[in-house]
Amino acid sequence: MPSDNTAFRLIGQTIGGCQIKKLLGTGGMGAVYLANQISLGKEVALKILDERWAAHERHIEGFLREARLAAKLEDEHIIQIYDVDTDRNFNYIVMQFARGENLKDRLRRGPLDVDEALGYIEGVARGLSAAHSHGIVHRDIKPGNLVIGEDGIIKVLDFGLARLEEGEKDKSQGQFMGSVAYMAPEQSEYMPVDSRTDIYSLG
């Protein structure tokens, strides 16, 4: 994310045609804000790359790759990408804002009943199937990356670790790409991944 001071200082500013309203959260690659897309007059989520990584070409490539891959996906169970660009040295992604809570927070309130759990699993599986049909592997399926909308539809977000199944060899040698608790064995051993990697994490 941008540094703590920068993250809050951006509130009220306009980046990429989006006026930032509030900070929603931070992650390994950037900060996510609730913003108003001025041209369309609608709420969006605006992800801005951490300024510490902006000077490193590899991180910029990874950030842009996330947007390009996810922008190909159109499915009700995947957060939609609207735009990706650079504005005043801020690299950003404009994406759908799903009002609701992530599955991680939902589970903190108590266990799901069987039908509810099966419904969410089916929804995520449908979203992943759409991604896999484009040769895209998420690589970090976990409760924190699944959002339950107010309409009850669950959506997959954060394709920051996504890669084409037959694309470039991963450049992050020596680093785990994913979350250990949900990681498929091949990820922890730096082996090639494919759609089965996501299925393991989901199941």
Image (cartoon, rainbow, N blue to C red):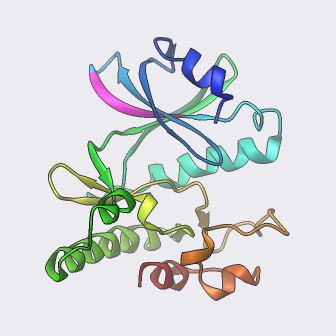
Image side of residue 80 versus residue 175, left or right: left
Image side of residue 188 versus residue 108, left or right: right
> In the picture, residue 160 is in which quadrant?
bottom right
For the question of whether residue 192 can be seen, the reply is no
> In the picture, residue 77 is in which quadrant?
bottom left
For the question of whether residue 43 can be seen, the reply is yes
In the image, what residue occupies the spot 26% across and 68% down? 110
- The vertical placement of 58 against 203, above or below, is above
* Residue 172 on image: x %, y %: 80, 63
Look at the image and say whether residue 170 sits in the magenta stretch: no
Residue stretch in magenta: 42-47
* Residue 162 on image: x %, y %: 58, 62
* Residue 24 on image: x %, y %: 44, 35
Which part of the image, by quadrant, shows the N terminus? top right
- The vertical placement of 121 against 27, above or below, is below
Type of secondary structure dominating the magenta stretch: strand
Q: Nearer the viewer, residue 111 or 164?
A: 111
In the image, what residue occupies the spot 54% across and 70% down? 137
